[in-house]
Amino acid sequence: MTEDVVRVVLVDDQELVRSGLRRILRRKDGFDIVGECGDGDEVESAVAAQHPDVVVMDLRMKRMDGIEATRRLRRHTDTPPVLVLTTFDDDELLSGALRAGAAGFLLKDSPAEDLIRAVRTVAAGDALLDPAVTGRVLAAYRSGAQDQVAEATPPDHLTPRELDVLRLVGQGLTNTEIAKALFISEVTVKSHIGRIFAKLDLRDRPAVIVYAFDHRIVNPGS
């Protein structure tokens, strides 16, 4: 991000939807729409050309859906996080987006202020899972990834502080909120999270959240 301006690529096959998103994510509020895609197969080239801070991705499109577009994008290094924005309250669909590497999801009927917060949260490197459907989506995610869960590295060799950070990430706190809760700097929080990724062989923040639920480090509703 440059001077607190979040560079955004919008991906949706409906011009009317993209127009509505442009009206919400306005330049005067700190957003710069640097690219738009009408289908999922346009995403990789748009990201390569525009270097956005975040991609706001629809799920159901005609030529390539948002899950496959996210999967292809996340194969590259240094790609921006993906926020899935969809009208479909479909647990399997949303859990598929998480497995593909999305940093979070939000339903399209959410208030405009929730979208603004979600885009900023994901651009800052945090995860954002819509609380209205998170519990069910995580259950679907776990159901589709039972083998991986069974083989997941146990948390035994995390330090007590890393376990504290893991627990708070699992509760959905941002780095700023974790720093305040533990009375440490955000830089230290990021260092702990990096070590958690490495020690547990997890690729992103949503995977950490799922891991925390799977290993009963965080319980639903905590």
Image: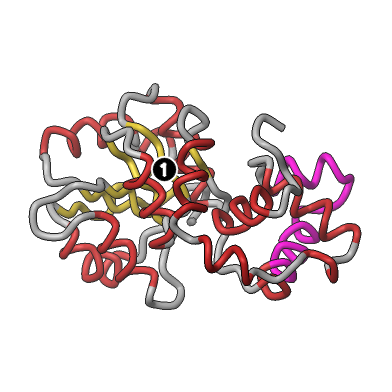
Question: Does any portion of residue 194 appear in the rendered image?
Answer: yes
Q: Is residue 197 left or right of residue 69?
A: right
Q: Quadrant of the C terminus?
A: top right
- Which segment did they paint magenta? 175-196
Total marks placed: 1
Task: Give the dominant element type of the magenta stretch: helix, strand or loop.
Answer: helix
Mark 1: few, some, or many residues within 10 Å (few <14, many ≥20)? many
In percent of width and height, residue 20 lies at: 22, 30
- In percent of the image, x 32 and y 61: which residue is there? 70
Where is 107 relative to 212, above or below?
above
Which image quadrant is residue 125 in? Answer: bottom right
Foreground residue, 114 or 27? 114
Give the camera-side residue of 163 and 8: 163
- Does residue 50 appear to the left or right of 53 in the view shown? left
Q: Amino acid at mark 1?
A: Phe
Q: Is residue 64 above or below residue 170?
A: below
Q: Name the element at disc 1.
A: strand
Front one among 125 and 133 = 133
In percent of width and height, residue 183 lies at 89, 45
Q: Position of residue 88 (x, y in %)?
A: 27, 35
Observer able to see residue 32: no
Identify the residue shown where x is 63% and y is 74%.
201
Residue situated in front as seen by the camera: 27 or 41? 41
Determine which residue is flagged by label 1: 105
Image coords of residue 155 (percent x, y): 78, 64
Q: Residue at x 60, y 68 (%)?
A: 202
Residue 155 higher or lower than 29, as above or below: below
Residue 180 colored in magenta in the image:
yes
- Please tell me whether residue 202 belongs to the stretch shown in magenta: no
